[in-house]
Image (spheres, rainbow, N blue to C red):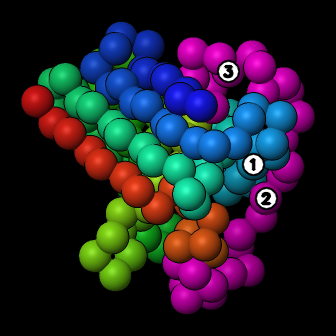
Amino acid sequence: MELKGSCHCGNIHFEFKTAKSIADFAPRKCECSYCTKQGSRYISDPEGELVIRISNKENLQRYQFGTKTAEFLLCRNCGVITNAISTIDGKEYGIVNITSLELAENFGRHSKMMDYDEETLEERLDRRKTNWIGNVKVEVS
């Protein structure tokens, strides 16, 4: 299955290829202050593939906070967060913000609430290597 998404203005587009069906996903809602303010909900598949295409690199904002181990990709023009990526041991891992998917409504309203505050840095990176999308490409025009 291929899930497509974008920011509101179309500057950031992405395709997420996965063998999972929509019913197989349990969207996660991070309880950190940033994700809470954004209302973001995330999915990933370690066996999946994520291709992110940026039309205008000047309108791409990479935002980091806290441990600075992930970058939230958002559009400076329309303000939408589409993905987050984390570079671990030279490899990029990613997640998809389902609110930016074309089929977002198919994921329903329920999300598993996640609190990562007690994780050590090593535990956080190990979780991402295990659970996030392991094949990520970012293409900038």
**Which dot, 1 or 2, sits closer to the camera?**
1
Q: Which mark is residue 114?
A: 2
On the image, numbered disc 3 is attached to which residue? 104
Alpha carbon of mark 2 to alpha carbon of mark 3: how far?
Answer: 19 Å
Q: Find the distance from the CA under tag 1 to the CA under tag 3.
A: 13 Å
Q: Where residue 40 sits: x, y (%)?
A: 64, 37
Q: Pick the quarter of the image with the C terminus.
A: top left
Residue that appears at 83% across and 34% down: 23
Cα separation, mark 1 vs mark 2, equals 6 Å
Which part of the image, by quadrant, shows the N terminus?
A: top right
User: Is 116 a magenta residue?
Assistant: yes
Element marked by disc 3: helix
Q: Quick check: 36 left or right of 12?
A: right
Tag 1 secondary structure: strand
**Label pair 2/3, CB-CB below 8 angstroms:** no
Magenta stretch, residue numbers: 98-126
**Image mark for residue 28:** 1
| Residue 13 or residue 75, whichever sits in front | 13
- Residue located at (55% from left, 88% from top): 122
Query: Could you tell me residue 83's position as x and y percent?
Result: 47, 42
Horizontal relation, residue 138 to residue 67: left or right = left
133 magenta-colored: no
Check contact, mark 1 vs mark 2: CB within 8 A: yes
Indicate the position of residue 123 as horizontal and vertical percent values: 62, 85
User: Is residue 65 shown above or below 40?
Assistant: below
Q: Residues within 10 Å of mark 1 (few under 14, many from 20)?
A: some
To which quarter of the image does residue 8 belong? top left
Left or right of residue 132: residue 13: left
Visible residue check, residue 111:
yes
